[in-house]
Image (cartoon, helix red, strand yellow):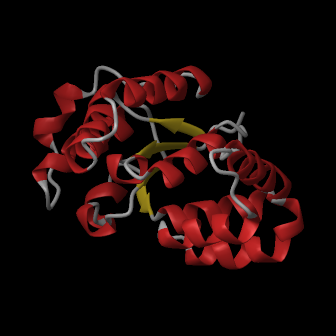
Amino acid sequence: MSSFTVVYDANVLYPAPLRDLLVRLAMTGLFRARWTARIHDEWMRNVLKNKPEIAPEKLERTRELMDKHCHDCLVENYEGLIESLTLPDANDRHVLAAAIRCGADAIITANLKDFPAAALSKHGIEAIHPDDFIVNNLDLNVAKVLEAVNKHRKSLRSPPVDVDSFLDTMLGQGLPQTVEILRNYKIAI
């Protein structure tokens, strides 16, 4: 397993298609994905608020599966760092605190403005958009990423999702660079 460690922000775990892809990528061993119980609570709370038709038990099951399949993913004992940190949105300090505590190299977030380089660089951490992060992993090991993408697409069985529909969904998740590259490998996904 790689020592490159990332913390997933709640905003990349909120949308199911992106969350599922990022978790499957974490299972490749190309990097270590980490998060906290608080990050879980945040994405789950927002899903339940915006999609009340989803049963809380279903999200709890997703949480359990994520924690089970991503080795050593939960960061703990980071709370003492929160108050000493400064970010544009004080509510994001817990994410940076978790990243510092676990020695993360990056925070994967769609809200780059909330994690400015000046605040993160002194801790040796950078904020990376999920599209850039996936492209970087494609550059590192296209075969492993394609395998994860293929497993993700094939897991969508109710109803089954064809490759073009899958790529359209990923485009809707804010992954234009990733989709552009994946279109060259349609036969593998």
Residue at left offset 60%, top offset 44%: 4
Can you say which quadrant of the picture contains the N terminus? Answer: top right
Toward the viewer: 138 or 169? 169
Residue extending farthest right: 187
Query: Quarter of the image holding residue 113?
Result: bottom left
Query: Percent x, y for residue 44?
Result: 30, 37
Query: Percent x, y for residue 100?
Result: 35, 38
Toward the viewer: 185 or 132? 185
Can you say which quadrant of the picture contains the C terminus? Answer: bottom right
Would residue 116 be found to the left or right of residue 128 on screen? left
Is 133 placed above or below 84 here? Answer: below
Residue at left offset 71%, top offset 37%: 29
Query: Quarter of the image holding residue 27?
Result: top right
- Residue 31 in sight: no
Is 45 placed above or below 139 here? Answer: above
Query: Percent x, y for residue 120?
Result: 32, 56
Residue at left offset 47%, top offset 21%: 64
- Residue 9 in sight: yes
Query: Percent x, y for residue 26?
Result: 62, 40
Toward the viewer: 60 or 174? 60
Would residue 117 be found to the left or right of residue 130 on screen? left
Query: Quarter of the image holding residue 140?
Result: bottom right
Would residue 101 be found to the left or right of residue 158 on screen? left
Residue extending farthest front: 159
Counting every numbered tag in the picture gives 0
Residue at left offset 63%, top offset 37%: 3
